Amino acid sequence: MTLAADPDTLAALARETISTLKPRAKSLIVTVFGDAILPHGGTAWLSDLIRLMEAFGVGERVVRTAVFRLTQDGILTARQIGRRSIYSLTDSGRQDFDAAQRRIYAPVRTRRATDAPWQIALLTSAVDSSERDALRKALGWAGYGALGPQVLLGIGGDLDRAKQELIHLGLDDRVALFEAVPGSTLAPLHALSRETWDLEATDMAYRAFIDGFAPVLHALEKPRGQLTPETAFVLRILMVHVYRRALLRDPGLPADIMPETWSGHRATELSAQIYDMLRQPAQAHLGTVVSGVDGSLPPPSEAYFSRFRE
């Protein structure tokens, strides 16, 4: 599968992005697993991962080290089949990946500050500083921000996920969770959002993403030749990787309490456009490199085809 585009420019953009970004192998493999491997069952041979990562300039030894560390972190688990090693997501790893997927591939949605309940996590004095930092990090992935040392806020998030994080951290008996519907005007909600979340830093990350990948969309829209499947795969992974880093620090606040110049919606629209154009050729590359346990790569899940779509 090839795509009519500007292949020379796109190949150069891929090389430039890798050179500028200098992604860590471990983090990039997480993106590859989430974007490419998970839709096909979440299992990959180590040898196939090594071949996939070659396109990013990541060598075999580095891949082996990164995968070993992901196994130590409890994200991946390994088993031997003959002389070959195959890696799968652990149960907790899959839960984390599934939660991230729901955010990363969600289409643009607009809502008002009064449409969704606000979640409030109140920390008792029995939560020490290291536990507080761990909780902030865990709930930060779910869009929660810190309003002072003892209060975390979220808007329209997954309350059940927050409860699971509390149980996982052993804090469910020392942190109280509430949901509340705002009864005030928008002015104090504006103020709360700026005190709780670093929206400027997130917007800067979105703008950097747009600056980096708007030229990719421009080149994709120029039918000057055939884009190779490998380049399509590299660009798709890099796009998701950079977009993910900005998105997962975004609290997903309602539009009516966000700055008028907020770049998040444009970043999501750009991601959706690029992803749709690269979907098939990138998938073709994956099918030639990665095989399943019993031979050919299993077909992607239904959820894969709904990425960035309503």
Image (tube, rainbow, N blue to C red):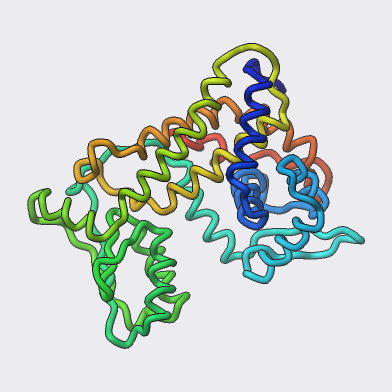
Give the image location of residue 233, x and y in percent: 67, 35
Q: Residue at x 40, y 53 (%)?
A: 249
Q: Camera-side residue: 88 or 237?
A: 237
Rendered image quadrant of residue 193: bottom left
Quarter of the figure with the C terminus: top left
Is there any visible trace of residue 237 in the rendered image? no
Give the image location of residue 276, x and y in percent: 54, 28
Is there any visible trace of residue 204 in the rendered image? yes
Quarter of the figure with the N terminus: top right
Give the image location of residue 19, x and y in percent: 64, 42
The furthest residue to the right: 83
Q: Residue at x 31, y 48 (%)?
A: 200
Give the image location of residue 275, x and y in percent: 54, 32
Q: Is residue 185 above or below residue 130?
A: above
Q: Camera-side residue: 301 or 69?
A: 69
Q: Left or right: where does residue 17 sit relative to residue 185? A: right
Rendered image quadrant of residue 109: top left
